[in-house]
């Protein structure tokens, strides 16, 4: 029998890689994990975690303003960006330590440095070679920025977490998750924010009503959204920039951020030489067991560019370990994955959009409600909530739920369980609401609006 240094060698210590390593090691497999940058990957360092901390930071001014409606007098507030960055960095360092401790406690060998896959069973890190029965690629993705004149002036979400100072004016290019989340953050922190999006609506893939609602609410707050346009070139003008748009007009700004998608990290570490198959977007192709065309090499998470969400990478890691070491079949169910956007208002969604449901089923009922959240009746904040439920009339099955408004991600997480369990509209209707909440609206939707 061939002897290997490790049973499993994981490349990339992001959410998917770390969970796979910990779980496999816990089952007695000899595991190593190589990481060149930071433990915890994108989510912990330049993604979900610091993003959400920034979202919290950006909401205080609204809350100070709202306090007057509840009888409070709040003295003049000031905001210190440097202090936020420092505190955020401390929290990230704390989380990195948590990751490190957990890996060490599970018995995973952490190897710091850039890994190079030499052959189907050999990885080198900083010149030292390790053999492994299996190699897992979990190297995630990296922001994509299109080639335009002036590209060198562009920052991405990676840079936004470490800016030395806040700009007065900012243009964000893109209309996806990162663009709308950062627009809300920067606007909330007092930056004059413009979204420049090539499409005619934000958040492609989401329900049309939610897309329209979000753009409307963001515009009401004072975020400038330019649709159906793009930046042709960025020109440097002293210490600011002029963005030249495709119609020839110019927008002056202090900073240009691109949030135009992410590309899988698949270059420069040996995959090409080994003949690991990539798709047209350079994502690693895997079968339903996360196995590449080289049988001892596996891949999961953003590097496979399927559903690029942290909890999905984690679920894939657990499914892989179960498959390899517990001999349990349990592939990830990619249907009904709930998702949230931490825009302002926040969005939560699970299941089919109205358009998808209409295409799939002939008999769809739509339930919808829009209202002013209770707090806003006194707060003076002009932000509404939208809730929507999609039901197949013949079977009574709820197949889609969408919400924009305060706490939408928290509420939709619970609703996702009901949808997975196959809940019918009758089950929702017979569920007693919790009063007074926004969530209770989902169990009191009476008339289809179709
Ligand atoms: P998205 O794919 O969500 O959005 C990219 C946006 O950029 C789209 O609006 C797209 O337009 C536009 N775009 C793409 N290419 C170009 C181009 N060449 N020129 C101009 N515009 C362009 O990517 P993000 O970068 O926002 O986020 C990456 C991924 O990270 C998300 O898809 C998501 O999976 C994950 N993520 C999840 C979060 C969460 O769970 N809350 C938060 C942040 C990220 P069009 O629609 O026309 O293609």
Image: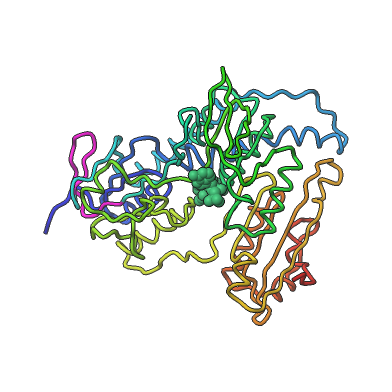
- Residue furthest to the front in view is 248
Please give the count of numbered marks on the rendered protein.
0
x and y, in percent, of residue 10 in the image: 30, 48
Relative to residue 369, is residue 177 depicted above or below?
A: above
Most frequent secondary structure within the magenta stretch: strand
Q: Nearer the viewer, residue 144 or 336?
A: 144
Say whether residue 131 is magenta.
yes
Q: Residue at 40% across / 36% down in the picture?
A: 38
Q: Residue at 18% across / 49% down in the picture?
A: 119
> Is 59 left, or right, of 266 in this rendering?
right
Q: What is the image's colouring?
A: rainbow
Which of the image's four quarters has the C terminus?
bottom right
Which of the image's four quarters has the N terminus?
bottom left
x and y, in percent, of residue 299 in the image: 33, 54
Relative to residue 128, is residue 9 depicted above or below?
A: below
> Is 25 left, or right, of 211 in this rendering?
left
For the magenta stretch, what is the residue range? Answer: 122-136
Q: Residue at 18% across / 37% down in the picture?
A: 128
Say whether residue 410 is magenta.
no
Q: Nearer the viewer, residue 317 or 242?
A: 242
């Amino acid at each position: 029998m061939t002897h290997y240094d490790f049973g499993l060698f994981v490349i990339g210590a992001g959410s998917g890689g770390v969970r796979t390593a910990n779980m496999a090691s816990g089952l007695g497999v000899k595991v190593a994990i190589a990481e060149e940058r930071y433990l915890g990957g994108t989510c912990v360092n330049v993604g979900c975690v610091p993003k959400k901390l920034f979202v919290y930071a950006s909401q205080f001014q609204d809350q100070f303003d709202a306090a007057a409606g509840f009888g409070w007098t709040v003295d003049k507030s000031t905001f210190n960006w440097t202090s936020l960055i420092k505190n955020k960095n401390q929290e990230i360092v704390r989380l990195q330590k948590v990751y490190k401790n957990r890996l060490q406690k599970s018995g995973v060998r952490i190897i710091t440095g850039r890994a190079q896959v030499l052959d189907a069973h050999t990885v080198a890190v900083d010149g030292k070679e390790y053999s492994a029965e299996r190699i897992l690629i979990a190297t995630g993705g990296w922001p994509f920025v299109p080639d335009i004149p002036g590209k060198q002036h562009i920052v991405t979400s990676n840079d936004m977490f470490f800016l030395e100072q806040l700009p007065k004016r900012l243009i964000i290019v893109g209309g996806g998750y990162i663009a709308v989340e950062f627009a809300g953050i920067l606007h909330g922190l007092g930056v004059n924010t413009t979204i420049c999006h090539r499409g005619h609506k934000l958040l492609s893939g989401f329900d049309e009503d939610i897309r329209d609602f979000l753009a409307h609410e963001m515009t009401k707050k004072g975020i400038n959204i330019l649709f159906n346009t793009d930046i042709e070139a960025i020109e440097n003008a002293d210490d600011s920039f002029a963005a030249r748009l495709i119609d020839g007009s110019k927008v002056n700004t202090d900073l240009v951020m691109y949030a135009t998608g992410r590309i899988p990290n698949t270059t420069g570490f040996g995959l090409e030489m080994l003949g690991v198959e990539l798709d047209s977007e350079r994502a690693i192709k895997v079968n339903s067991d996360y196995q590449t065309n080289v049988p001892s090499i596996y891949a999961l998470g953003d590097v496979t560019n399927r559903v690029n969400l942290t909890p999905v990478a984690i679920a894939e890691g657990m499914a892989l370990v179960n498959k390899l070491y517990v001999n349990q079949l349990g592939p990830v169910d990619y249907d009904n994955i709930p998702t949230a956007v931490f825009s302002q208002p926040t969005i939560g969604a699970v299941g089919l959009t109205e358009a998808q449901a209409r295409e799939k089923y002939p008999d769809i009922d739509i339930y919808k409600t829009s209202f002013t959240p209770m707090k806003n009746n006194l707060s003076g904040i002009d932000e509404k909530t939208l809730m929507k439920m999609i039901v197949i009339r013949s079977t009574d099955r709820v197949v889609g739920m969408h919400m924009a408004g305060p706490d939408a991600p928290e509420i939709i997480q619970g609703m996702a369980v009901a949808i997975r369990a196959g809940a019918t509209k009758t089950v929702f209707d017979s569920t007693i609401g919790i009063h007074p909440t926004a969530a209770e609206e989902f169990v009191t939707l009476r008339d289809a609006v179709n």
